[in-house]
Image: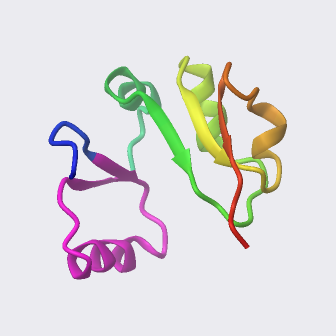
Amino acid sequence: MENPQFVRFVFGAGYNSEALRDLARRLALKKVDFPGFVNDVESIWKTHHALVLPSRTEGLPLALIEAMMCGRFGIVTKEGGTSEVVEEGRTGFIATLRK
């Protein structure tokens, strides 16, 4: 059962934006919002509580640093530099990917 209070937000305006919107429609996902690019990062974190980065490959994403600078935690994978800056259970959570 889906939590009626849980809304997913996908910020940014990268080359996959339209494909992500299309995927959400095809999967009939409810409560997914695509605000696009936002200049004022702090305004995002005043109303959002966590950053989810389900990456299979990743360097050290600026989005994670920005979220942490605003006091928010990251839910990340062990890929790339994300798990080097997240302290498990204190500044976020590190998920293990299934192979």
In the image, 5 versus 71, the foreground residue is 5
Residue 49 sits inside the magenta stretch: no
Q: Residue furthest front?
A: 1
In this picture, residue 63 sits left or right of residue 31? right
- Residue beneath the point at 36% across and 30% down: 48
Residue 18 sits inside the magenta stretch: yes
In the image, 20 versus 4, the foreground residue is 4
Query: How many numbered marks, from 0 up?
Result: 0
Compared to residue 40, the image places residue 19 above or below, namely below
Protein image colouring: rainbow
Q: State the image coordinates of residue 53 (x, y, percent, origin top left).
A: 58, 51
| Residue 7: quarter of image | top left
Task: Read off the magenta span.
Answer: 8-36
Q: State the image coordinates of residue 56 (x, y, percent, origin top left).
A: 69, 66
- Residue beneath the point at 64% across and 46% down: 76
- Residue beneath the point at 71% across and 54% down: 96
Compared to residue 18, the image places residue 92 above or below, namely above
Q: Quadrant of the C terminus?
A: bottom right
Compared to residue 6, the image places residue 17 above or below, namely below
- Residue beneath the point at 66% across and 33% down: 65
Compared to residue 45, the image places residue 7 above or below, namely below
In this picture, residue 84 sits left or right of residue 6? right
Q: State the image coordinates of residue 88 (x, y, percent, origin top left).
A: 73, 29
